[in-house]
Image: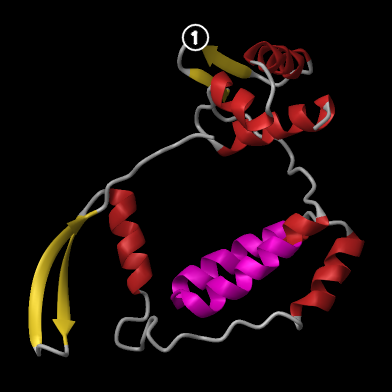
Amino acid sequence: MNRIDRISAILVLLQSRPVVRAVDMAQRFGVSIRTIYRDVRSLEQAGVPICGDSGIGYSLVDGYRLPPLMFTPAEALSFLTASKLVEQLTDQQNSKHFHSGMDKIRAVLRSADKINLADVDSSIEVYRNNLLPSAKHPNLLQTILGSINRRLVLDMRYYTPSRDSVSDREVEAVLQMQIN
């Protein structure tokens, strides 16, 4: 990866995470920590307001926003594929949120990439799994995701047809963060 691409990728990382450690960036890009320090310094000299605490990591100043960076055709195609999967394999509410995000992604694509996605769109098909969200629980995934976000305990009831038994469990999400 050349320096310009690496600096752009560092900027994307800083925009997408609250804190990014230099050692993690060095590992990710296969360069030394000193190289990361120089790249971050270049971003600062270009006017990007970066905060850095020794031993903690780098972050963008709160409230600082940059215009969207361009997606590669391969990235755009991967988002289209993910869109098809989300549409068929998650609940209606999650699909709605994803499609809203996908519209924002399409909005920043070059015209040629928009045309390419439109052409490929009809070639990708994901078939719905009948075990997924039903009319009885149409937005169950949103309930689960909401409990994770608000750190709530879910009371879940399981039915085991082979034993004709019901069991109750309290389930609590445990968040693990790993910055790469």
User: Is 115 rendered above or below residue 26?
Assistant: below
Q: Is 87 in the magenta?
A: yes
- 134 or 38, nearer to the observer: 38
Q: Quadrant of the C terminus?
A: top right
Quarter of the image for the N terminus: give it.
top right
Q: Residue at x 65, y 34 (%)?
A: 65
Q: Please state the extent of the stretch shown in magenta in the rendering.
A: 77-105
Which sits in the foreground, 80 or 142?
80
Q: Secondary structure at mark 1?
A: loop
Of all residues, the one furthest to the right in this rendering is 112
Q: Is residue 169 above or below residue 53?
A: below
Residue sitting at x 55%, y 76%:
87
143 left or right, relative to 8:
left
| Residue 114 spot, x, y in % from top left | 84, 66
**Predominant secondary structure in magenta?**
helix
The 10 Å Cα crowd at callout 1, few under 14, some 14 to 19, many 20 or more, is: few
- Residue 135 vs residue 161, the one in the foreground: 161
> Could you tell me residue 150's position as x and y percent?
29, 50
Q: Report which residue position mark 1 lands on.
A: 54
Q: Was residue 84 drawn as part of the magenta stretch in this picture? A: yes
The residue positioned 76% from the left and 43% from the top of the image is 69
Amino acid beneath label 1 = Ser
Q: Residue at x 12, y 65 (%)?
A: 169
Where residue 137 sits, quadrant-wise, is bottom left
User: x and y percent of residue 145 in the render?
Assistant: 36, 60
In the rendered structure, the answer to whether residue 6 lies left or right of residue 151 reads right
